[in-house]
Image (cartoon, rainbow, N blue to C red):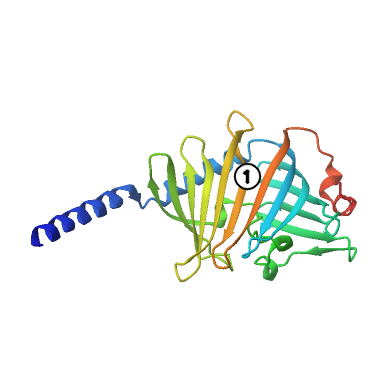
Amino acid sequence: MKIFSITTAILLISVTCIIAQERITDEERARAIFEEVDDRRNSIETETAKMEMVITDPRGRTRSRTMQSWNVTDGDNNKSLIVFSDPGNVRGTGFLSTTENGNTTQRLYLPSVGRIQTIGSSERVDRFMGSDFTYEDLGSQDPDDYEFEWLEEHDDYYLVRAATPDSDQYAYVKFEIIREKYTLQRVHYFNSNDKQIKRLDAENFVQLSDRLWSPAKMTMYDLREDRKTEITWSNREINVSIEDWRFTERGLRRGI
């Protein structure tokens, strides 16, 4: 028994040393890796796509949504519009998000009430159209929104931990970044009690440009309520002309 205990202790020490060697407390390097992800994500000027959303509740029941999206990127500035086409009870609903000079404004148009609602700071934690994505999750993920703490180097990916000082939902997140492609493959969300409350998985990566690989499917898991939301992209076109009016209140009301 003593020999077994000593051997086990040696193995535990060895594993701890390996983990310690993998974890690098280098905030600047962690930030630089995430900034490369952000730079590649912003490397295409425009994108249009069809999107399918499937919401699965704890009992396994599903609800489906169909959407059309338009996106324009100009450096650090971004404009994104999503319009729902099906089913009928959400048809014409639009969501417009604009980021300029580091400031993000989000607006939601509900045809049933005929008005445009600006999403305030207190509503950022609300579910987007009943899904497991909140309005905060649909933000720009600007590197300046995070305080990077450390990273781990694995064979195929980096694991970067970052605090989220302006978030009312998450105390910190951990980003899994594919080393070869510099794109996010998984995001872990934690609360102030160090409990993981959500997870975002990305898969089915497609190469949109010489620098950018993007997932064709993303799934957000709410680990507290045992539910999930899947979003898939199809009919994607990049660097096509998009009219400026799309990203105005007129475009928000007009829909598809």
* Rendered location of residue 76, percent (x, y): 65, 45
Res 204 → quadrant = top right
Residue found farthest to the top? 210
* Rendered location of residue 236, percent (x, y): 72, 36
Q: Determine whether, in the image, residue 80 is placed left or right of residue 188.
A: right
Quadrant (top left/top right/bottom left/bottom right) for the N terminus = bottom left
**Badge 1 element:** strand
At 57% from the left and 58% from the top, the residue drawn is: 221
* Mark 1 residue type: Lys
Give the class, few, some or many, for how many residues have Cα within 10 Å of label 1's Cα (few <14, many ≥20): some
Q: Determine whether, in the image, residue 181 is placed left or right of residue 206.
A: left
Q: Determine whether, in the image, residue 19 is placed left or right of residue 197.
A: left
> What residue does disc 1 label?
217
Observer-nearest residue: 199 or 139? 199
Residue found farthest to the left? 2
At 78% from the left and 59% from the top, the residue drawn is: 107
* Rendered location of residue 213, percent (x, y): 58, 36
At 45% from the left and 51% from the top, the residue drawn is: 160
* Rendered location of residue 179, percent (x, y): 46, 38
Number of marks in picture: 1
